[in-house]
């Protein structure tokens, strides 16, 4: 798995730093939820590798400065399944990690991707990563957007509690 993390870093330093922050913050939330050390370790790897499937997405799409076309966004959406397949191929013991990677863009109301899972049908790791990934993405500058103030990002997450995010995990 360390090799996959290095691949992410070599391809795009910004994504690598993003993944490190998502992993760290996912574990912080996991600790608050009472996950044991083994679960926290798996959650860490799930957070670190949540975007590994982007190695299967064209660089010009990932680094595009403007709004993505519908077709380009469909290509980006494939990263969740690509990452799942990569991690699952390593070992059956990594299934929770792979499930977190696949489900980190699912939304509580079922409007997410890739499977349109809803509520508690979304694996816990995916529900955790969804929150910290969105916060991290909003508060980071990207080629296509300025960074948000952390308070504004928290307000966004709170406003979508029970819609995009698990209401039991957004407890502010």
Image (cartoon, rainbow, N blue to C red):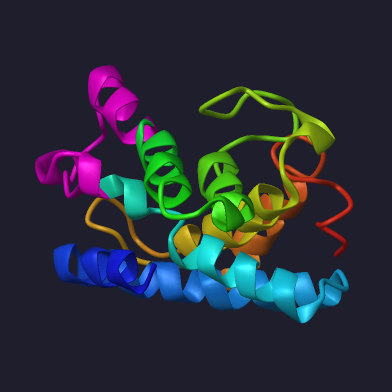
Q: Is residue 37 left or right of residue 56?
A: right
* As drawn, 26 above or below 46: below
Q: Is residue 29 visible?
A: no
- Looking at the image, which residue is at 63% across and 66% down? 43
Residue range highlighted in magenta: 55-77
Q: Relative to 149, is 20 on the left or the right? A: left
Residue 95 x %, y % = 59, 49
- For image coordinates 60% across by 60% down, the residue present is 153
Residue 63 within the segment the image draws in magenta: yes
Tell which of 108 and 172 is nearer to you.
Answer: 108
- Residue at the spot x=53%, y=58% of the render? 133
Instruction: Evaluate whether residue 122 shows in this view.
Output: yes
Give yes or no for residue 158 being in the magenta stretch: no
Left or right of 156 on screen, residue 146: left
- Please tell me which residue lies in front, 79 or 159: 79
Q: Quadrant of residue 122?
A: top right
Q: Where's the N terminus, which quadrant? A: bottom left
Residue drawn at point x = 40 percent, y = 65 percent? 147
Query: Where's residue 163, x and y in %?
Result: 75, 34
Q: Position of residue 152 (x, y in %)?
A: 61, 62
Give the main secondary structure of the magenta stretch. Answer: helix
| 12 over 77 or under it: above or below | below
Q: Would residue 46 be found to the left or right of residue 156 on screen?
A: left
């Amino acid at each position: 798995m360390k090799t996959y993390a290095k691949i992410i870093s070599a391809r795009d330093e910004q994504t690598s730093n993003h993944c490190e922050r998502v992993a760290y913050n996912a574990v912080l939330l996991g600790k608050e939820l009472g996950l044991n050390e083994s679960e926290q370790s798996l959650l860490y790897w799930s957070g670190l590798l949540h975007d590994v499937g982007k190695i299967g997405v064209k660089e010009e799409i990932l680094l595009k400065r403007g709004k993505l076309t519908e077709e380009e966004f469909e290509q980006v959406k494939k990263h969740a399944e690509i990452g799942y397949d990569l991690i699952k191929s390593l070992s059956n013991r990594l299934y929770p990690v792979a499930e977190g990677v696949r489900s980190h863009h699912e939304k509580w109301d079922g409007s997410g991707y890739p499977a349109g899972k809803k509520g508690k049908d979304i694996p816990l790791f995916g529900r955790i990563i969804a929150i910290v990934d969105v916060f991290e993405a909003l508060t980071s500058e990207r080629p296509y957007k300025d960074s948000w103030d952390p308070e504004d990002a928290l307000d966004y997450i709170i406003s979508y509690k029970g819609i995009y995010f698990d209401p039991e995990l957004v407890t502010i």
